[in-house]
Amino acid sequence: MKILAVGAHPDDLEICCFGTLARCVARQDEVTVCSVTNGNLGHSSMGKDQLKEVRLAEAQKSATLLGASFCTLDVDDLSLASRDEEVRQKMVNLLRSVEPDIVITHCEEDYHSDHVETARLVWHSLLMAPLGEENPLKGGVVLYEMDLVGGGIFIPTEFVDITTTMDKKMEALALHKSQIEFLMESGGRDLLRDVSELAQYRGLQCGCHYAEGFRLSMRRPCIAQRLLP
C-alpha cells in the first residue's frame, strides 16, 4: 500500500505516528511523510532562515532513518490557512502524485492552530483531488486522525502495537535536536519523555508495552477491514 502522513510541523509525525509508519515500512508499504510548514518559528534564539534550514534537514534525516520519502509545502509557522488556494493546490498535487491508499494527519481537536488547519487542509484537498481533468486522484482514500500530545481529548478507535519499533521512533525523534532544546529551554518540557509516556499509556490501554492511537475519520469512506499494521 501507499501511505501519506501529513504533519503540520517537521517533528509532528515522529511524535504521533512514526512507530506505526516504521511498521508500515517493514511490511513493504511505500511511505511518504510531509511537513506542511517549514518550522521556522520553533526556536527562541535562532533566526527564521537558519531555523528553517535546520528543521527541514532534521526532518529529512528522520525520514531517511525511517525509510520514507520526505517533502514539505514550505508554509511559514502560524501562517497556515486551510482555505488558501495556493497551499490547497500544493496538497492536491501531492495527493495526486503519491496516490495514497491511506492518509494520516492531525485531528481538528488539537491544541495548535497549525495542527487544526492541517487537518482541515487535508480533508478539503481529499475532496478536491478527484475532481477535474488534470490527473485526478482515483480510488477511495482512507483517512486516519492521529493522537495529540499537548492537551485536548483524543479517544482512539484503533491502536497499533509499536513495541518492536519504539526504539526507531525515539531515535528519529531525537534527530530533532532544535525542538528538544527549544521546548526544554522555553517551558521545561522534556519532549522525549512526554512522547515515551504517551506511547506507554496507549500501550497500557490496549495490552502491550508501547502503542500509538488513531481514529478512523468518518468524513471519508468507511472500510470493512483493518489497514493499519
Image (spheres, rainbow, N blue to C red):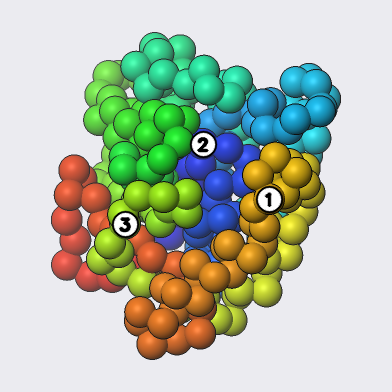
- Which residue is disc 3 drawn over? 154
Q: Which mark is residue 8?
A: 2
The three-letter code of the residue at mark 2 reads Ala
Image x and y of residue 27, in percent: 52, 72
Q: Residue furthest bottom?
A: 207
Q: Is the C terminus in the top left, top right, bottom left or bottom right quadrant?
A: bottom left
Residue lying at 72% horizontally and 49% vertically, measured from the top left: 184
Work out whether mark 1 precedes mark 3 in sequence or the reverse, and give the earlier one: 3
Give residue 136's quadrant in the image.
Answer: top left
Ranked by sequence position, the earlier of labels 3 and 2 is 2
Tell me the residue that label 1 is attached to. Answer: 188
Q: Secondary structure at mark 3?
A: loop
Q: Are marks 3 and 2 in contact (CB under 8 Å)?
A: no
Is 11 or 195 nearer to us in this picture?
195
Q: Residue at x 75, y 44 (%)?
A: 185
Examine the rendering and report whether any part of residue 82 can be seen.
yes
